[in-house]
Image (cartoon, rainbow, N blue to C red):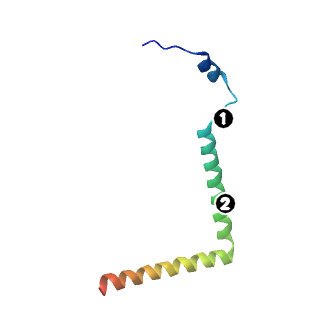
């Protein structure tokens, strides 16, 4: 197997200004995750938002319990 190194391959290897697409996507995901974590902490610190979150989760839990009761025990 003869491998020929063309001038194109050499020029591409020396190009340091090339963007690393995979690394920029990872960097973006890390930054977005941090922003999402900040938003969640910020909204949890707000008393109205916290009360609304607890109320919605409580409602969903009660609804799921009702569905399980009605379907499994009554059915």
Residue 53: which disc? none
Q: Is residue 50 left or right of residue 73?
A: right
Q: Nearer the viewer, residue 17 or 2?
A: 2
Percent across and percent down for residue 16 are 68, 27
Label 2's element? helix
Kindly state the secondary structure of the residue where label 1 is placed: loop
User: Percent position (x, y) of residue 19?
Assistant: 66, 35
The residue located at (59%, 75%) in the rendering is: 53
Q: Furthest residue to the top?
A: 2
Q: Tell me if label 1 and label 2 are in contact, CB under 8 Å.
A: no
Give the residue number, with chain letter if any, for mark 1: 19
In the image, is residue 33 above or below residue 74? Answer: above
Does label 1 or label 2 sit earlier along the sequence?
Answer: 1
Determine whether 49 is above or below 15 in the image.
below
* Label 1 – label 2 distance at C-alpha: 28 Å
Q: Choose top left, top right, bottom left or bottom right for residue 21.
A: top right
Residue drawn at x 68%, y 70% as measured from the top left? 45
Q: Circle 2 sits on which residue?
A: 38
The quarter of the rendered structure image containing the C terminus is bottom left
Q: Mark 2: few, some, or many residues within 10 Å (few <14, many ≥20)? A: few
Residue 42 spot, x, y in % from top left:
68, 66
Residue at image point 43% right, 79% down: 64
């Amino acid at each position: 197997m003869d491998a020929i190194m063309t001038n194109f391959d050499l020029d591409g290897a020396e190009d340091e200004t090339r963007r690393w697409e995979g690394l920029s996507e990872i960097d973006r995901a890390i930054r977005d995750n941090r922003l999402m974590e900040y938003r969640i902490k910020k909204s949890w610190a707000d008393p109205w938002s916290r009360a609304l979150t607890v109320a919605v989760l409580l409602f969903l839990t009660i609804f799921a319990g009702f569905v399980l009761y009605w379907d499994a025990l009554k059915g």
